[in-house]
Image: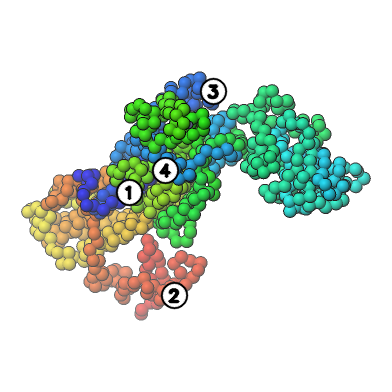
């Protein structure tokens, strides 16, 4: 069978981004599958060993949130009341159901695919563990206390990719506050006029003032002690922002360097922290003057710069916000309020205290969780990080080893090509994911298990059959190898983006049959990624490759264009313009949909899905192919077949060079078709290949067949008829083989009918068992045919001009793709071919 891998065949691997089983498959999946399958089929026909592995991303918060909605739950307390084991069982069922829908759709589409590698399978989880162990041993995976993005409803840290998701920044703008803080003291030797002045701070998040620990100034910035005519008020702002912040009727009474201001202290306006007395003004190079006052409030639990300054200046880290995003109930003024709703409450309190100078609207985006729509919080918490920033050079070197297909030249990279600019927070304080394989004793010794066998040894019992998910795995307590104390598992699970990014490596190990931990599997030749990059799979795969095996999972990457709706808009649930794939397949056939996805537009370009286009493909392109085949079969049955094709009921067809000119012409076109379609597909220029096939079908059906109709009528009773039958049979044979990867159902149907009616000895029963056609040498156009064409066109002669002679006919013209014709000539181009006509009348 074609599917059986034959020993000694070179491997050719096309890998693909695993789709997420958090919902039903959409048209984008169909498109990616159609392209993947077309290439796999072509490469099998060319004699390569082509694995047909598929993958499915089954874990993660997206699955959890969908299941929460379905069960009418929201948030961790609900889930825990429902029961973690039951909840994860529902998540597994949901992933299975969606996974089966993906498999069914692949089958309906005719895509060759083995059972997919599903990320929730125990073997896959063990493979992930082994990679995490490698990272941990290399010091690239660590737990640390940092400020990261946090969703208060999902109650978990999120990564930069969750922030970059198209639905993450929905709300922009809000009301900010300009607040004054009375200076309490200044450092020795500072300008005495500072006494009694106010520090002006602008904040777009007034709730942060509840947790205020200090005010930062830039040490190199010049600050103005500003005064308003006729008033005693003195305020301090960066001189550069004076007019913007206060208007024109304030003047500079004195200038103070930022370094001189640092070391002063101020009185808090709202003292929630319970720390009596003044707070410090500290220096910080992170302070900007662009949109604020050049003075920045610090809330160390809620900002990365704030937390770093707290470490430097030994500031208290006050975090009164609970896991659900609400302020602790016993806090004055804001107790029990959701953090994002506390802005108004705090602003009113500032006003009551006489500290509010002004409120102003701002346009800053307020990031929201793309899954649940809840405002996100930046907060300091303990989480697990992959230290991407410590291997930046390695990530870049890995990236540079990967080619982009089609080769575009230059440095055009996919949007999420690399993620070496920030460490990757990979832990989620959630339920349905790969449990982090770390066990920790009360002394803080961490032990990492790279497999269930290793874990069994650590636990002192056989865990081979265990479901390595929560809560089953949480029940496994090991004995700490360092101190002998009992060590439970850390509670976190893994970001599902890691699972997906690890998948190509897991599959390569599997393909090589190597033990876990070895990386000798064959590398994918091409990996196809979704142009949307919504989940950052490419970057995840690249980062993981640089960090553990030290090599990319693939040698080249092809970003497949998004399928848009018929008015060119991105399809999304929010816009309500999602197209269901199955009804389309039922209406137009899997082959028409595959043709649309594969060869109707350049692979990397977005393509608008219109039913008119599918109708054209099904009716015109594929219809022409079927009509031509039916025409041949009809005449072969009624008028007989030539002897040369294996039957004995007619005359033998002469060799091609002795056949009529029309036959010679269409056969030369056929050779060009093979050469150009092969080159187009090899170079991932599929639209050109599709246009070439459609053009050939048109020429065959609308020109060759009518022009030879008389001879077909003779059938194999005359030499001319036998030649026409043999010629058309040759064309159908080759066409069917080059269409097989794109339209596998129709091509196989035609192949079987041709075999039944006019079988060729030794030919396989299915077109998918044949080999890819090789282009024979292409004859030039026969002189006799050129004369015939010239006579039909009423011109003196027809000459074939090679591309390097074209410039003699065309003047360069930057404004036009084909240039301007030289004086006295007219030119026309179509499908990459140019016709030039000397328009001078030859009288
Ligand atoms: Zn959320
Ligand atoms: Zn220990």
Q: Could you tell whether 422 is left or right of 703 in the image?
A: right
| Disc 1/disc 4 C-alpha distance (Å) | 16 Å
The answer to whether the residues at label 2 and label 4 have Cβ atoms under 8 Å apart is no
| 377, 737: nearer the viewer | 377
**Residue 653 point in image, percent of width and height:** 12, 60
Along the line of sight, which residue is nearer the eye, 37 or 539?
Answer: 539
Q: Residue at x 30, y 48 (%)?
A: 40
| In contact (CB < 8 Å): disc 3 and disc 2 | no
Tell me the number on the disc at residue 134.
4
Residue at (13, 51) in percent of width and height: 762
For this view, does 318 lie left or right of residue 542? right
Q: Which secondary structure, mark 1?
A: loop
Residue denoted by label 1: 520
Give the distance between the C-alpha atoms of the residues marked 3 and 1, in whole angstroms: 45 Å
Instruction: Give the numbered dot on residue 144.
Output: none
Q: Secondary structure at mark 4?
A: helix
Q: CB atoms at circles 4 and 3 under 8 Å apart?
A: no
User: From the viewer's perspective, is residue 332 above or below residue 247?
Assistant: above
The Cα atoms of the two marked residues, 2 and 4, are separated by 67 Å
Residue 77: numbered disc: 3
**Nearer-N-terminus badge (2/4):** 4
Residue carrying label 2: 822
Is disc 2 placed on a helix, strand or loop? loop
């Amino acid at each position: 069978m074609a599917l059986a891998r034959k020993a000694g065949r070179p491997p050719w691997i096309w890998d693909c981004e695993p789709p997420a089983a958090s919902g039903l498959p959409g048209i984008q999946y169909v498109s990616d599958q159609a392209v993947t399958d077309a290439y796999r089929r072509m490469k099998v026909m060319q004699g390569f060993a082509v694995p047909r592995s598929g993958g499915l991303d089954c874990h993660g918060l997206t699955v959890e949130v969908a299941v929460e909605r379905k069960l009418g739950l929201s948030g961790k307390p609900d889930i825990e009341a429902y029961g973690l084991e039951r909840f994860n069982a529902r998540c597994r069922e949901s992933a299975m159901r969606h996974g089966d829908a993906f498999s069914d759709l692949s089958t309906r589409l005719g895509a060759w695919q083995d059972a997919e590698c599903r990320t929730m399978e125990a073997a896959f989880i063990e493979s992930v563990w082994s990679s995490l162990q490698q990272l941990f041993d290399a010091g690239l995976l660590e737990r640390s206390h940092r400020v990261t993005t946090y969703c208060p409803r999902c109650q978990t840290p999120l990564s930069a990719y969750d922030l970059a998701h198209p639905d993450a920044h929905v709300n922009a703008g809000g009301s900010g506050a300009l607040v004054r803080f009375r200076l309490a003291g200044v450092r020795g030797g500072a300008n005495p006029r500072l006494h009694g002045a106010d520090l002006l701070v602008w904040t777009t998040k007034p709730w942060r003032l509840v947790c205020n620990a200090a005010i930062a100034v830039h040490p190199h910035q010049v600050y103005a002690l500003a005064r308003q005519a006729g008033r005693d008020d003195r305020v301090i702002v960066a001189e550069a922002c004076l007019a913007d912040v206060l208007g024109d009727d304030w003047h500079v009474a004195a200038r103070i360097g930022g370094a001189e201001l640092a070391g002063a202290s101020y009185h808090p306006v709202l003292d929630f922290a319970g720390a009596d007395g003044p707070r410090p003004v500290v220096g910080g190079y992170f302070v900007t003057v662009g949109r604020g006052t050049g003075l920045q409030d610090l809330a160390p639990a809620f900002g990365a710069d704030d937390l770093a300054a707290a470490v430097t200046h030994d500031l208290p880290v006050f975090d009164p916000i609970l896991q659900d995003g609400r302020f602790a109930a016993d806090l004055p003024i804001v107790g029990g309020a959701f953090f994002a709703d506390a802005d108004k409450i705090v602003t009113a309190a500032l006003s009551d205290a006489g500290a509010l100078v002004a409120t102003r609207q701002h346009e800053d985006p307020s990031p929201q969780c793309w899954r649940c729509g809840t405002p996100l919080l930046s907060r300091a918490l303990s989480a697990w990080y992959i230290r991407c920033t410590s291997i930046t050079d390695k990530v870049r070197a890995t990236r540079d080893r990967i080619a982009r297909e089609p080769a575009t030249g230059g440095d055009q990279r996919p949007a999420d090509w690399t993620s070496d600019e920030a460490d990757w927070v990979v832990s989620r304080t959630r339920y349905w994911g790969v449990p982090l394989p770390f066990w920790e004793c009360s002394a803080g010794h961490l032990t990492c298990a790279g497999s269930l066998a290793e874990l069994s040894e650590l636990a002192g019992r056989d865990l081979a059959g265990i479901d390595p998910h929560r809560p089953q795995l949480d029940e496994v307590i090991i004995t700490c190898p360092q101190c002998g104390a009992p060590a439970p598992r850390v509670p976190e699970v893994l970001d599902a983006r890691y699972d997906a990014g690890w998948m190509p490596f897991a599959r390569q190990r599997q393909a090589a049959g190597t033990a876990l931990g070895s990386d000798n599997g064959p590398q994918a030749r091409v990996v196809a990624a979704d142009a949307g990059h919504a989940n950052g799979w490419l970057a995840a795969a690249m980062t993981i490759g640089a960090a553990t095996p030290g090599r990319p999972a693939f040698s080249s990457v092809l970003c497949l264009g998004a399928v848009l709706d018929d008015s060119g808009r991105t399809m999304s649930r929010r816009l309500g313009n999602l197209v269901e794939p199955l009804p389309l397949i039922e209406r137009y056939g899997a082959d028409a949909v595959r043709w649309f996805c594969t060869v109707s537009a350049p692979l990397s370009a977005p393509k608008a899905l219109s039913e008119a286009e599918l109708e054209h493909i099904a009716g015109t392109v594929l219809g022409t192919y079927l009509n031509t085949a039916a025409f041949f079969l009809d005449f072969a049955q009624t008028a007989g077949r030539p002897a040369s094709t294996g039957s004995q009921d007619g005359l033998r067809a002469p060799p091609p060079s002795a056949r009529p000119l029309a036959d010679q012409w269409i056969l030369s076109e056929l050779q060009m078709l093979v050469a150009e379609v092969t080159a187009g597909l090899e170079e991932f220029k599929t639209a050109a290949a599709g246009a070439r096939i459609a053009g050939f079908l048109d020429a065959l059906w609308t020109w060759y067949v009518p022009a030879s109709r008389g001879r077909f009528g003779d059938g194999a009773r005359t030499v001319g008829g036998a030649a026409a039958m043999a010629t058309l049979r040759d064309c159908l044979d080759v066409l069917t083989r080059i269409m097989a990867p794109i339209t596998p159902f129709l091509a196989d149907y035609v192949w079987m009918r041709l075999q039944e009616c006019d079988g060729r000895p030794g030919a396989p029963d299915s077109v998918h068992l044949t080999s890819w056609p090789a282009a024979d040498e292409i004859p030039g156009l026969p002189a006799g045919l050129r004369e015939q064409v010239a006579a039909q066109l009423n011109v003196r002669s027809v000459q074939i001009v090679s591309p390097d002679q074209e410039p003699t006919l065309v003047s360069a013209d930057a404004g036009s793709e084909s240039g301007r014709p030289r004086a006295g000539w007219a030119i026309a181009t179509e499908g990459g071919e140019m016709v030039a006509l000397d328009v001078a009348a030859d009288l």
